[in-house]
Amino acid sequence: MNLSDNAKCRVRRNSAENGAPRGKALILAAFLLGYAANSIFGVWNVTFPLQQEKGDKKTTTTTNIDKIVNGLQPSGDMFALTHYDKDEQELMEEIRKEQESGERDKYYLPKSYKARLDNKHFDDTSLTDGYQKEVYIAAMLLARRLVPSNDNGRNNTGHGKHQQRNRRGLVLDIGTGSGYKLIKFFSPEFETIGFETEPAISFLRKKYPNEEWVDSGKPEESLPESWNSNSRKPDVCICSDVIEHIRDPNDLVQFLLSLQCKAYVISTPKREALAPFLGGPPKNTHHVREWTLHEFKMFLESLGFRVVKSYEGIQHISTQFAIAVPDNNKKKE
């Protein structure tokens, strides 16, 4: 190696050595920036992602809901709209034909799919908002648009049943778990009712004694036949990552429809993100079934919902959720 080659080698080595710290610094800066953005948009500032709606409007029609959903803006890039383009429409048509020909079951899953009917009960009372945060933020944005506030929240202070008269709207959470996300994103701005089974229902009543909780019955199987609505009409119903735990999800969907909410936000893990090449049973031993995004949309619509928009999670790519309304045009079988 001559002197010229040796000099060039030193230059390349020095450049690499000097560039390594800069590269690490850039990676660290990007991480800190991302963390800060998530803190600002994902956690600390979620109370004010949209301006409060004004006016004294009392009812919302299906057409208005379509406009409202179309106007929703993700908070801090928490979730993304799934567009049903031509290719996806063709895929859904193929799924529909397979279901009609008997290649898929009544849940719109392939006949070869293996469900887990001996799933274990999942106690999530220790969890906070590590999962499904996107779902609750979307539901919060939807509820704020559906139920305009006349006082911009000035009277919505403090917790307790004596504050219910100052809360706007009614939000139901079916399978609320620890109740953390429901309380964090909706109380005390909205009146809330959480539905749960044991041991979570006892936990909720002890931790949040001034909030309203309904015992939903036997885990994985039953649902309350009735609940004391006191003639209240629910605005938004959340059912976040519950349906995959229920042995007969048709029962859950019919129960949701019986609540007669203006709009629903329903989520479940996305099978193509968790196990794209597996035909079941789910890896998660607490799950009975898992759907792809298209299967889930078509399953909901087969039972009486109209899915206005479908969304995918960004923080958690395995999250999918639908904003749906009752399909009044669908004939009951």
Image (cartoon, grey):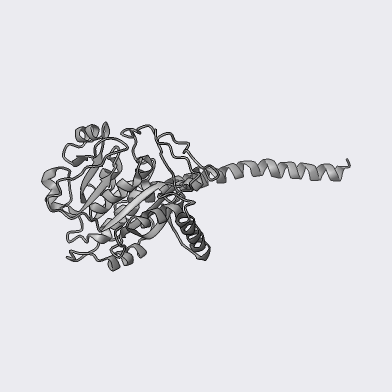
244 over 74 or under it: above or below: above
The single residue placed furthest to the right in the displayed view is 2
Residue 77 locus on image (x, y percent): 43, 54
- What quarter of the picture does the N terminus occupy? top right
Relative to residue 109, is residue 179 drawn left or right?
Answer: left
Residue 309 locus on image (x, y percent): 39, 60
Give the quadrant of residue 150. bottom left
- What quarter of the picture does the C terminus occupy? bottom left
The structure residue drawn at horizontal position 19% and vertical position 66%, both measured from the top left corner, is 55
Closer to the camera in the image, 95 or 121: 95
On the question of residue 88 being in view, the answer is yes
Residue 30 locus on image (x, y percent): 52, 47
Closer to the camera in the image, 254 or 120: 254
The structure residue drawn at horizontal position 33% and vertical position 53%, both measured from the top left corner, is 265
On the question of residue 77 being in view, the answer is no
Give the quadrant of residue 72. bottom left
Number of marks in the image?
Answer: 0
Relative to residue 290, is residue 174 drawn left or right?
Answer: left
Residue 119 locus on image (x, y percent): 39, 34
Relative to residue 182, is residue 271 drawn left or right?
Answer: right
Relative to residue 171, is residue 117 drawn left or right?
Answer: right
Closer to the camera in the image, 322 or 219: 219
Closer to the camera in the image, 102 or 35: 102
